[in-house]
Image (tube, coloured by chain):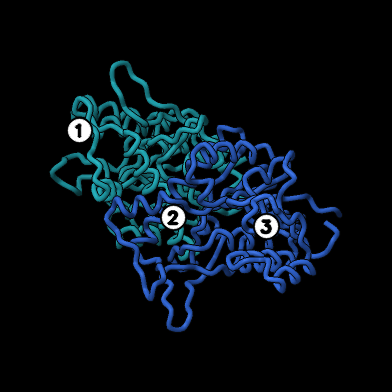
Chain colours: A blue, B cyan
């Protein structure tokens, strides 16, 4: 049986922080034909609210840590303010959306990250995705909208990286769907020349990826990002696209598409 | 066909503001056998956070108004912090819970209250409940947990009275279930003598209700509360119970039970 296509789209601060860009993105997203899932990161509103409340970022050994007060703020802003604003906007656009955190219906169970000698605070690494529930929702023509808050099934909420949530959901759903995972960020794609914003490498397979790393063309921040993408592809995701907000428009063809082999 | 029983339980500030009381209530709630829905109000955390952010309550003609800044805070605190904390606690108690605002899956569509010459700000009066979606959730053995944030289907979130949300959901679900609506508050029930906390009137039907109003035994704040309860009963809800947190325990029998007639 041919699996149905499922689009998972992740957006971050560059879209969320700009009301016009966000609404324009949500319009394009709502027009996607296939079943779809939105994953959103944070944005500057959490920092602004923490500052307004007089909270100072907690730093341990130069690393920013999610302490209890910070966890409270990100839970409020990500799961409350942003998630419900985005959901209400999608309803206006006739996209039948359901805002979710990882605690809801046990969608994303994680555990507090513990690495010897490093305190990450309330940062969560994903253990399981409730793909059964997500499938029930999709089958009812509802679009899940995930924020990056998870829980440990023992009453503790946790702050989790939104890129990771998108790829973990993509991997879990690839048992039932042909999953296309779309990462939207500030660039048009993976660049051949970091100084030329149009030097987008349009297709990268596993072989090309290894060449790009060897030749040093893929720069520092992009290495873990692409590593995670190929991890998702190896675990069953059909395709990963990386680009700016125009990525999900049919008219756009300048973005980077990642697949395991040449057949996509 | 005999309808299945559905318990709807509404809690307010007196439970939410006390962590021990909240956890103890959630334990009792999680042990309820029948399908169930939780509706929670706000509590003092929203006021504390508004104060920490330097916001002053907006008053118009002596009335507190939900202005834009207040709406942002209640959305964060009710739909984010409280709703997700309660949901995570219920998962710990093996109650398979799903936190919801009215924007999620269009669960509660409302309109901005407009009354000539009175500005209520972003206060919403309920128009429709998506009982079809709620039924899908219940049929999947999931317990919905509603906060008191609604939306107008045109992108605007609204602040709505939690008592009203509970009764509107109860009315909407009574087409498919035998609904028992439980209001938990600071007293043991409707009191015969306001100075005696144990003078609970255990059963009130429509006839008795009218007698109690005529005789002046029902005091000011209780009049609209009971009016709403009998409105729900007239529209199909089977029974309304009013009492303190022990109301939902099998062992408790001191609370007020409201029905249209004597047969309950």
Q: Where residue B118 sits: x, y (%)?
A: 28, 21
Of the pair B246 and B75, the residue shown nearer to us: B75
| Residue identified by numbered label 3 | A191
Displayed quadrant of residue A218 = bottom right
Q: Residue at x 33, y 29 (%)?
A: B121
The answer for how far apart the CA atoms under marks 1 and 3 are is 72 Å
Q: Where residue B180 sits: x, y (%)?
A: 44, 43
Q: Are marks 1 and 3 on the same chain?
A: no
Q: Where residue A93 sits: x, y (%)?
A: 59, 33
Callout in the foreground (1, 2): 2
Q: Work out which quarter of the rendered image holds the N terminus of chain B and state it.
A: top right
Which residue is farthest top?
Answer: B116
The answer for how far apart the CA atoms under marks 1 and 2 are is 36 Å
| Residue identified by numbered label 1 | B219
Which residue is farthest left?
Answer: B195
Q: Residue at x 37, y 55 (%)?
A: A73
Q: For mark 2, does the 10 Å Cα neighbourhood hold few (<14), some (14 to 19), or many (20 or more) residues?
A: many
Q: Where residue B204 sits: x, y (%)?
A: 32, 36
| Residue identified by numbered label 2 | B84
**Is A232 left or right of A4, judged from the image as shown?**
left
**CB under 8 Å between callouts 3 and 2?**
no
């Amino acid at each position: 049986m041919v699996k149905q296509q499922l689009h998972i789209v992740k957006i971050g601060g560059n879209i969320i922080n700009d009301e016009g860009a966000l609404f324009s993105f949500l319009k394009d997203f709502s027009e996607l034909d296939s079943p779809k899932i939105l994953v959103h990161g944070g944005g500057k509103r959490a920092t602004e609210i923490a500052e307004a409340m007089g909270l100072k970022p907690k730093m341990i050994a130069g690393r920013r840590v999610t302490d209890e007060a910070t966890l409270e703020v990100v839970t409020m802003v990500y799961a409350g303010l942003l998630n419900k604003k985005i959901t209400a906007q999608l309803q206006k656009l006739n996209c039948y959306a359901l805002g979710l955190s990882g605690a809801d219906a046990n969608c994303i169970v994680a555990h507090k990250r513990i690495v010897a000698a490093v305190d990450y605070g309330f940062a969560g690494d994903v253990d399981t995705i409730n793909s059964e529930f997500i499938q029930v929702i999709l089958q009812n023509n509802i679009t899940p909208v995930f924020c990056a808050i998870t829980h440990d099934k023992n009453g503790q909420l946790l702050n989790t990286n939104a890129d990771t949530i998108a790829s973990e959901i993509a991997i879990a759903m690839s048992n039932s769907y042909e999953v296309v995972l779309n990462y939207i960020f500030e660039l048009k794609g993976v660049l051949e020349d970091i100084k030329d914003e149009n030097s987008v490498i349009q297709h990268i397979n596993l072989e090309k990826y290894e060449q790009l790393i060897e030749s040093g063309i893929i720069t520092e921040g992009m290495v873990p990002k692409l590593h995670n993408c190929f991890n998702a592809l190896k675990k069953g995701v059909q395709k990963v696209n990386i680009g700016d907000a125009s990525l999900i428009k049919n008219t756009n063809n300048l973005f980077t598409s990642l697949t395991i082999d040449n057949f996509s």
